[in-house]
Amino acid sequence: MSIFGDDVNYNLEFRSTKDDGWYHCGVVLQHRNRLRVKFNHFDKISNDEVFSVTDFSTNDDVSKFLQRFRPESEPIGDNRCSRVSEGLMVSASCTGGNHLRKFDAVVEAVIKKKHSPEKCLCTCLLFWQHGPEEGHTTTKHLSNVYLIKSGSVDPAVLNFTKLVKEKVNRASTEFTLIPKNPYLFKGTSSNENITKPQDFGSVGHSSHDGFSAVSEGFFPVSDKGCEKETGNQHYLILENLETDVCPLFLVDFIHEHTLITAQAYIIPHLLSETCARAAIVVDKKTELETIYKFLNNPNHIIVSSSGRPWVLAEDKVRTGSFSTNLHGFPPMSEKGNMKKDLKVVKLGTEEYTKAKQQKDLYMLFRNYLNDVVQRLAMEEESINDGPAQ
């Protein structure tokens, strides 16, 4: 029996705010304004993490808090190593302080070994997404690897976040963040706060100076009451997307493969254009680095059901403050391509070969367009500098 008068159901994992590790836990809602997270293998009450309704100021805070909870991950178990494959996001144990904690990682390879049904000897190479080994690849025995499960969390968590949202909405100024075209519209001005783009190094096939010339980030509008300053955020531009792609679909797909909740803004395209662009936005640089590595992994290409491959618009990510125009875009809930039709096609497959050909063809077009843009700029400069006719 819990000292709080209720049995604690230890059926969750919580990503601790103290060390970013996932721990087996249960939750207790106290006095309708506090949520206590109790860790299964920690006896002292001082080890609990306690959150109050007053700790949150935006709905985005609430969403990120919810992402710290998930159902308890499932051990691989002996003789079930076939469930682990390259590219799978898993959770893996890491000892520390005599307690089990887990961090998320992407499986880069599985090293199969002959073994009996009772004892698995297989190992895998893991690329760590966070924790002490973040950004590194190490070897782990499959007995230390867990399958991440999706599903609903404890009702106490949902009841708590409902209370928080009610409080936030009462205090909110009701401003809404809506995506903004990277092209300057009438009444806009360039953002003086934006920083120099951060170079991730050459990816060999996605640098577009022409695109850079017209996409120096997002720009503020002067329409008061339809503007919200968001502070520094980190974002990259995707192109060659289907024209009916839905931003919520992009968010779901990226979260499925990276466990990161981003924001996705579709950039309006001309009617004559056959593809669309999108901005993927997050608050933390480390989160965008993870997304970038997933999108730019040379071992796979992301394609739509029609075979259209995603392309990174630049070798860089951008950092800066930007605001968004409430009237410039359709609402985020507008119906679009909601089908689960995106694929991650692997190197060495026929699908990958076809996607690579499509990507090379698109890049040929983009490079040609860049040349035209540069030629136009030179011709305009020549006209401006020359004598009047």
Image (cartoon, rainbow, N blue to C red):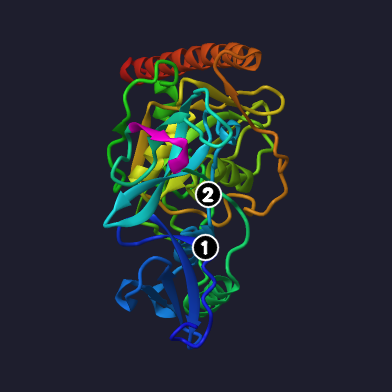
Q: Residues within 10 Å of mark 2 (few under 14, many from 20)?
A: many
Q: Amino acid at mark 2?
A: Pro
Viewer-proximal residue among 186 and 103: 103
Residue to which mark 1 is pinned: 12
Residue 110 x/y as whole percent: 49, 26
Secondary structure under tag 2 reads loop
Residue 85 x/y as whole percent: 55, 30
Residue 280 x/y as whole percent: 48, 42
Asked whether, in this view, residue 344 is left or right of residue 172, the answer is: right
Residue to which mark 2 is pinned: 179
Viewer-proximal residue among 96 and 389: 96
Where is 230 relative to 198, above or below?
below
- State which region is magenta: 137-144
Asked whether, in this view, residue 273 is left or right of residue 76, the answer is: right
Q: Amino acid at mark 1?
A: Leu
Q: Quadrant of the C terminus?
A: top left
Residue under the point 49% across and 48% down? 262
Asked whether, in this view, residue 261 is left or right of residue 48, the answer is: right
Q: Residues within 10 Å of mark 1 (few under 14, many from 20)?
A: many
Q: Can residue 236 be seen? A: no
Secondary structure under tag 1 reads strand
Residue under the point 48% across and 29% down? 122
Magenta segment includes 139: yes
Residue 311 x/y as whole percent: 52, 25
For the residues carrying marks 2 and 1, which lies nearer the camera in this image?
1
Mark carried by residue 376:
none
Q: Can residue 335 be seen? A: yes
Where is 331 relative to 372, above or below?
below
Query: Is most of the magenta stretch helix, strand or loop?
Result: strand
Distance between mark 2 and mark 1 Cα atoms: 34 Å
